[in-house]
Amino acid sequence: MDLTTTVSFSEMFAMAGQAAVILADPTRLGFLFAGVLMGLVVGVIPGLGGIVGLSLLLPFTYALDPYSAIAMMLGLGSVTVTSDTIPAVLFGVPGTVGSAATILDGYPMARRGEASRAFGAAFTSSVIGGLFGALLLGVSLPILRPFMVSFSEPEMLAICIFGLSLVAVLSGSAPIKGLIAAALGLLVATAGNDQEGGTLRWTFDSMYLWDGVPLVPFALGIFAIPELADLAITRKTIAGDTKNINARGQLEGVKDVFENWFLVLRCALIGSVMGSIPGLGASVIDWVAYGHAARTEKGAAKSFGKGDVRGVIASESSNNAKEGGALVPTIAFGVPGSASMALLLGAFLIHGIVPGPKMLTEQLDLTYTMVWSVALANILGAGICFAFAGQLARIAMIRVGILVPLVLSMTFLGAFQGSRDWGDLYTLMIFGFLGWVMKRFRWPRPPIILGFVLGGLIENYLFISISRWGFEWLSRPVVIIILSITLISVMWPLYTGYRQRSKAPRGGRRFAVQRDYLRNPDLGFTVLIFGIFLYAAIYSAEWELATRLEPQAVAWFGVVATGLVILTNLLMAPAERKPGDQAVAGQMTAAGDDIHFDIQADYGDLSSRVIYTRAARYFFWCVFYIGASHVIGLIPALALFLVGYMRFEGKESWRVIFLVVGPMWLFCYGLFHMVLRVLWPQTLFGQWFPVFRGIRELNLF
């Protein structure tokens, strides 16, 4: 170790101590605590997330000193991915995109009465992951600068492609369908104005789509709408028939974390390292950690996605750790490691802080104030959540007639924050119905989100890599290593699945036309997806090379893959079912074959007529809320929607309705209209009575 490094480390420890003294000021601790409380509230509300919270907080930091301002903002940004666990576990609704992977195992745990255990595991993993990220930030800043500089677009592209390889893990026993879903997500991500060629892709003459499909309504549609639909159809509480949700089960979750300590450290390392890579963000990191756990943990192939606490641990330990990692490029190079870090960079500029070498030398005390802020925020956030975990878990016992409209209304308002356009609500419903259909046919939904999130990054890095290096970027050592691992990750599940199908006993001929499949609704859905890919392939063929490069590749892959699924199910005889086996909707046998569609298998003893009737009523109320919003506005329609749903679907008394709807409406009015100052779109009522548009408190129309 040379003298420079020695001096650097000695100065590092001295400045860390000085920063601790600076942050220990009661006033600064108060601002940090206020930021943590705001972050916890923002994280619970689906669709808001840390970006909205930081945007709201940024103007209030003008009058603060740099230490207090940065502490407050980091307090908020560090804990939104702690409290977003609450809606993810209880409702199957991601509070932020960083909790999407938590749903896969957290929600099934809540359904069987283990919400508290999931909370205990999630909050403990979060605080450990957050502290790990802060520690890594503290020790890595003087070391990682040369490494970060060496990373360029080809390496970033290889990492994004590796992220897509997780589709094979996230697709369960249907890897090909998972790849198709990911391709569909990639295709949706190409919508909008192409930055390279300037071509409008898949906008259908709608200005709303010029900037592409917003992530928030897309993600809420794929995950939230289908889960709430199932609650509305079954009309059972989140905990199902379980009467005791074990309110003290969080201690069991804590025990699970320490029993799986090595998994926590590995996933925290993944979150920290990937968080330090600009552009990846929380949308990808939790999936990478989850996929790693699904590949490496014993028995994960059978239990993950069905309520395995290790899935919750993997996701939550990574998404909190990424905040510390994301600060590395923000501080060292002025390159935001995530969207929230871009807002933090704005706060830097407001207070005259210039990211770069000075942050690692002259302003090292400010840098380590950030490290301490991240660490303390995670401890405070997890402690507050943990203290109320038992009470929060009791939400799982709330009657569906009350819970569904409350969460659904917040989902609509959260989706509207995507671009604050009526198109956000249409996007929510279109992809919400798609998500419900995919769930019924057992098409994996996580891959479509993963493909959508990575689509823009892949296209951007691909264009730059080819423009600058041609195809020589494929010969770079790091790229070769990452792509080799990716190829193995994708091909191995397909190979093992093929071997299982080959060995499975089949009655009669191995290949024959399966007439039952011709009557299977899954065939119609697959043909529809095939048609979308074929249309995209033909329509985009005349675009310029830079514009059509990704759409063409994705579309033709989708055509081939969906065609393969159709031919396989149509011509290959299914494996023999053992005596006593029951057909489950779209479920796969050990050999990986579709059985057949049976919607009743999803809803117990409910008849098909009851199921379809309740589903139609649920989607009617969704459409009703959008229609009423066009007439009288989103906030006024909220009260009408809540009262109508609780009275006619929940059969609740007027007393209960008044006690629930009143506070809920006032909360939404205060948050969205008075605090966030949302500019609501024009309604018919606003056109009839424009006088209300001139009054700030009544400008809801």
Image: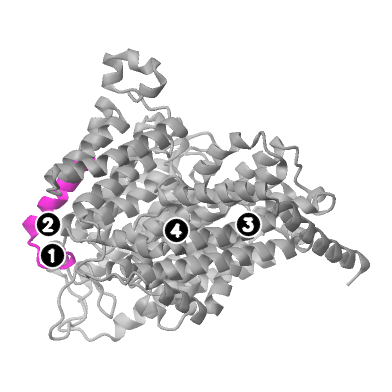
| Disc on res. 600 | 1
Q: In which quarter of the image is residue 141?
A: bottom right
Residue kind at label 1, given as amino acid type: Gln
Separation (CA) of disc 4 from disc 3: 19 Å
Residue kind at label 3, given as amino acid type: Val
Disc 2, SS: helix
Q: Quadrant of the C terminus?
A: top left
Residue range (magenta): 597-622
Give the mark toward the camera: 1 or 3.
Answer: 3
Q: Residue at x 29, y 75 (%)?
A: 592
Question: Chief secondary structure of the magenta span?
Answer: helix
Separation (CA) of disc 4 from disc 2: 29 Å
| Disc on res. 611 | 2
Residue kind at label 2, given as amino acid type: Ile
Q: In this view, does 430 lie to the left or right of 267?
A: left
| In the image, residue 619 lies in the stretch drawn in magenta | yes
Image coordinates of residue 532 in percent, x first then y, are 32, 48
Q: Do the residues labelled 1 and 2 touch (CB within 8 Å)?
A: yes
- The tag earlier along the polypeptide, 1 or 2, is 1
- The tag earlier along the polypeptide, 4 or 2, is 4
Disc 1, SS: helix
| Disc on res. 374 | 3
Give the mark toward the camera: 4 or 1.
Answer: 4
